[in-house]
């Protein structure tokens, strides 16, 4: 009786550890399928299109408004220390190092993870995954590997585009609303950005893309039965992807910038 | 030849298969009958390894199905799923030709398409459906596309899970004949699940009845009517009263 709360804690810890183990095994299997033929190119290119190209509008809009708001905030916050002039630099570094990758990552979790999870879970529930097996096609190779590979390659690109659009949003607000000189704003931005900033941004993008697609596939493949199973898989996949992306962001920031 | 020895499978507390023993001779057509929810589909899936039995042994031509090299093993099989299980992101002909478009049986696209259209014709579908998507077809048409996909690569062993459910009587007749043809002409081994007694008589060489997790009766289709087995008698005559409870 007295021990039951402790037992409950123990159970959930074990449960979480078991899940982490399963996800790691799933990730390793996926990576093995990257390098072992056959490769399903058509599925890969379709994923590139749906994950990359069709995410452009949402990524662009998110980054644009965030960049603009960031410029306003830094300007008004900076005014307290007479440091309004740092807007271009802080917008650039904030977008590239943190906001660009994180926002794109979260948008991908919302848009891509959910749709991958729902699609694969539906395939599982309607026996399409079983049908794949009977047609001598490995579901991990046919469904998971192309999606995860595509996301890993294309999300850095989206992050790069998001970074640029975010900086542009800040630039527009800075020059039109806050009275910055156009040429000086651009010069300050360009001078301040370093190679590590860009490398860290793109690396984060690759890692977040990997996580987002992987979690969609993982929860889809492990979906329960029926419409409820699909709904549950979708919800859990987005939550897991978002949390893991934020955690990975912290770890990567430590790796790149703590020295 | 497919043999099942003492196969057990439970899902949590639900003991579905409780010692199934069954032999399907090579080149024969075995029909499995039994009440809804008795585990007929689970039985087929366990031969293919889609469901792992808790206990027991399944062999195909004497080889343990679980130990077999997966690709070579599965290449010998075709399966029609109860729900069709068509890939809804692919067009009808790409579904039918799935196996012919990738892997070891890969061939040029135009050839694969021709084969797909020919198989569609055999299940009574016009070439015009080839470029539609599964969601644009009726349930019975989807079932027939699933059937065409199962036979597309001309496998040696074919499993049909309720091939005629949801079809009109004429189409059922066409499909029954097709299954018979596949067994007789191609020498395939077939295992069919059906609830339709006229299909049973049209398709079967052998019949097995699954009840309470075991094979209640098995024998040649000709012996079915004079089996003297009260379970089988109740089932084939569709009587509500008898040893099989009507609430399961
Ligand atoms: N993946 C699964 N998880 C849990 N239970 C399952 C699973 N697959 C089948 N079952 C259960 O096993 C039992 C047998 O299912 P099965 O689909 O084999 O029935 P069936 O004999 O094919 O019935 P029907 O004629 O209605 O198709 C059912 O009670 C079903 O709920
Ligand atoms: Mg069934």
Image (tube, coloured by chain):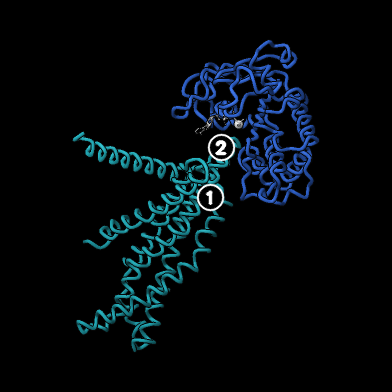
Chain colours: A cyan, B blue
Q: Position of residue B161 (x, y in %)?
A: 65, 31
Left or right for A183, reference B210: left
In which chain is the residue bearing label 2? A
Indicate which quadrant contains ligand 1: top right
Considering the numbered disc 1 on the image, is that residue within a helix, a strand or a loop? helix
Q: Position of residue A152 (x, y in %)?
A: 44, 55
Q: Quadrant of the C terminus of chain A?
A: bottom left
Residue bearing the label numbered 2: A130
Query: Crowding near pointer 1: few (<14 within 10 Å), some, many (20+)?
Result: some
For the residues beneath circles 1 and 2, the answer to whether they share a chain is yes
Q: Nearer the viewer, residue B131 or A45?
A: B131
Q: Hey, which residue is sitting farthest front in the picture? A: B241
Residue positioned 50% across, 50% down in the render: A118
Left or right for B107, reference A23: right
Residue positioned 31% across, 72% down in the render: A93
Q: Position of residue A241 (x, y in %)?
A: 39, 53
Q: Quadrant of the N terminus of chain A?
A: top left
In which chain is the residue bearing label 1? A
Left or right for A223, reference A203: right
Considering the numbered disc 2 on the image, is that residue within a helix, a strand or a loop? helix
Query: Crowding near pointer 2: few (<14 within 10 Å), some, many (20+)?
Result: many
Give the CA separation, mark 1 to mark 2.
Answer: 15 Å
Residue B167, relative to residue A91: is it above or below? above
Q: Hey, which residue is sitting farthest right in the picture? A: B170
Residue bearing the label numbered 1: A119
């Amino acid at each position: 009786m007295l021990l039951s709360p402790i037992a409950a804690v123990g159970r959930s810890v074990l449960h979480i550890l078991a899940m982490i183990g399963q996800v790691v095994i799933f990730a390793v299997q996926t990576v093995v399928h990257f390098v072992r033929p056959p490769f399903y190119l058509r599925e890969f290119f379709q994923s590139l299109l749906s994950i990359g190209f069709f995410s452009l509008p949402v990524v662009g809009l998110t980054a644009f408004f965030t960049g603009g708001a960031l410029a306003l905030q830094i300007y008004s916050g900076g005014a307290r220390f007479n440091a309004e002039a740092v807007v271009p630099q802080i917008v650039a570094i904030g977008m590239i190092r943190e906001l660009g990758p994180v926002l794109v990552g979260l948008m991908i979790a919302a848009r891509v993870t959910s749709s991958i999870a729902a699609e694969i879970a539906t395939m599982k529930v309607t026996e399409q995954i079983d049908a794949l097996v009977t047609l001598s096609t490995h579901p991990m190779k046919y469904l998971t590997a192309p999606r995860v590979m595509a996301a890993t390659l294309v999300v850095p690109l989206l992050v790069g585009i998001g970074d640029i659009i975010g900086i542009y949003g800040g630039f527009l607000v800075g020059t039109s609303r806050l009275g910055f000189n156009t040429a000086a704003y651009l010069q300050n931005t360009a001078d301040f950005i370093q190679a590590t900033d860009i490398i860290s941004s793109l690396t984060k993008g690759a890692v977040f893309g990997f996580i987002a697609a992987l979690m969609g596939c993982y929860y889809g493949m492990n979906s329960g039965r029926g419409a409820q199973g699909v709904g549950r898989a979708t919800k859990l996949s987005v939550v897991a992807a978002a949390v893991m992306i934020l955690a990975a962001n912290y770890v990567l920031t430590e790796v790149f910038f703590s020295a | 030849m497919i043999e099942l020895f003492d196969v057990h499978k439970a899902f949590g507390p639900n003991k579905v298969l409780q010692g199934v023993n069954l032999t399907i001779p090579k080149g024969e057509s075995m029909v499995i009958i039994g009440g809804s929810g008795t585990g007929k589909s689970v039985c087929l899936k366990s031969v293919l390894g889609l469901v792992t039995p808790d206990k027991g042994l399944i062999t195909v031509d004497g080889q343990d199905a679980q130990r077999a090299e997966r690709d070579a093993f599965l290449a010998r099989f075709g399966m029609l799923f109860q729900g069709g299980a068509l890939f809804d992101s692919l067009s009808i002909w790409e579904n039918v030709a799935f196996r012919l478009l990738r892997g070891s049986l890969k061939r040029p696209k135009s050839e694969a398409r021709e084969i797909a259209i020919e198989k569609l014709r055999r299940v009574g579908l016009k070439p015009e459906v080839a470029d539609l998507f599964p969601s644009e077809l009726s349930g019975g048409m989807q079932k027939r596309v699933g059937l065409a996909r199962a036979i597309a690569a001309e496998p040696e062993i074919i499993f049909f899970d309720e091939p005629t459910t949801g079809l009109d009587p004429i189409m059922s007749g066409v499909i029954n004949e097709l299954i018979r043809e596949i067994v007789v002409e191609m020498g395939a081994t077939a295992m069919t699940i059906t609830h339709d007694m006229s299909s049973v008589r049209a398709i079967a060489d052998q019949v097995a009845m699954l009840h309470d997790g075991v094979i209640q009766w098995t024998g040649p289709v000709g012996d079915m009517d004079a089996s003297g087995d009260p379970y089988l008698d109740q089932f084939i005559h569709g009587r509500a009263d008898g040893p099989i409870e009507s609430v399961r």
